Image (cartoon, helix red, strand yellow):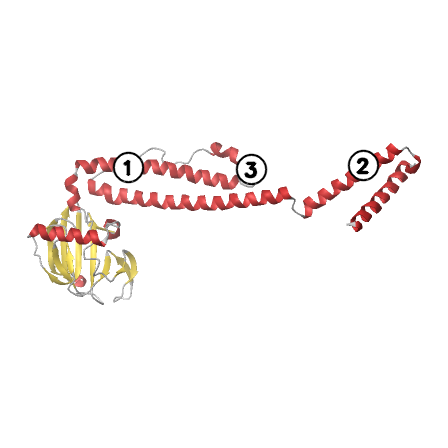
Amino acid sequence: MYGRIDFFNIFIKKMSEEIRKVLKFDINERPRWVRIVVKLFVAMLIAASSNILISTYGDTPKMSSIRRENKRLEDKCRILYGKISSAERTIADLKHRDQYVYRPILGIDTLSIPGIYSDYVDAKYEHLHEDKYYGEISHDMWLRMDRLMRNIYYASVCLDATQKQAQEKAEYSAIIPSIWPIDRTKMRSVSSLFGMRHHPTLDTWRMHDGVDITAPTGTPVYATADGKIRLSRVQGGYGDLIEVDHGHGYTTRYAHLSARYVVEGDWVRRGETIGEVGSTGTSTGSHLHYEVRYRNTPVNPVHYFDKDMSEERYQEIMKQIESSRN
């Protein structure tokens, strides 16, 4: 403490000498008030210099508080970006289902709202660029939020329209392939999904038109919707194959079966046992190859499975179907 006082006293003395040289008078010969003014000026000069040095090479309490606040804002921005991304994925899934599942089933054309996917003019976001640090972040965030709000509005209008059509066409519900083709308690895994894959026996990349569900040989296979048996035969790499025509452009295929309980022309209901899992045709193990086709074009069966249905609910539906037959 005393060392600092001595340092400032020496500094003040030196500054006084320099000022005295510049002003060309001996401060000790001047009135007391003049000496006080000079010392106050020197003290203020020292304080200002110290403040500049501390602000330049160290954090003041105010700067530390600002840095902490900036850190909190950055964390909030990251959380908000994550929520926006999650919402965008949900809306994209709803849009896909609306365009490729609900509307084809109900025979509704894709909804068109002029300008729904056009961004707002840049002038709307000009005021955000006033902040040099957060301007770019704010612009991107508000742009994505505006897009999200427009997509939510579009999805809402689409769902309202499809709901209205669904109420008017309730009979369509029976032809939607919306349950699993086997009892999920007996399912070991989904060994191959819809899309391009490396064929396990042909050693080449090719399109896989359905999903492969691994299960023990003899596991019952159910019709996933009401329909008429179009095919029930051995057919090439499919092995024992059953194809059901559900109407309105929808068909399903069940391949590599070990047994077939239906013949061409039979009418089946959703949940009815039509065959058993096997490994016939081009197959490397016991599994069910299941396809959903719309207007003879393969579509991803996963979009038609009821993701929210619990195993208990599935078993309950199966029991209801069995009791209704007896």
Tell me where residue 95 appears, x and y as whole percent.
Answer: 31, 42
Q: Which mark is residue 131?
A: 3
SS label for mark 2: helix
SS label for mark 3: loop
Circle 1/circle 3 CB separation < 8 Å: no
In this figure, which residue is indicated by the disc labeled 1? 158
Residue density around tag 3, few if under 14, some if 14–19, many if 20 or more, within 10 Å: few
* Side (left or right) of 237 relative to 123: left
Q: For the residue marked with disc 3, what is the amino acid? A: Asp
- Disc 3 versus disc 2: distance between alpha carbons? 39 Å
Mark 1 or mark 3, which has the lower sequence index? 3
SS label for mark 1: helix
Mark in the foreground, 3 or 2: 2
Mark in the foreground, 2 or 1: 2
Tell me where residue 302 appears, x and y as whole percent.
Answer: 26, 52
Q: Which mark is residue 40?
A: 2
Residue density around tag 2, few if under 14, some if 14–19, many if 20 or more, within 10 Å: few
Mark 2 or mark 1, which has the lower sequence index? 2
Residue 291 in which image quadrant: bottom left
* Side (left or right) of 32 relative to 103: right
Is residue 149 visible in the rendered image? The answer is yes
Pick the residue in front: 30 or 274: 30
Q: Is residue 307 above or below residue 255?
A: above
Q: For the residue marked with disc 1, what is the amino acid? A: Cys
Circle 2/circle 1 CB separation < 8 Å: no
- Residue located at (89% from left, 36% from top): 23
- Disc 2 versus disc 1: distance between alpha carbons? 76 Å
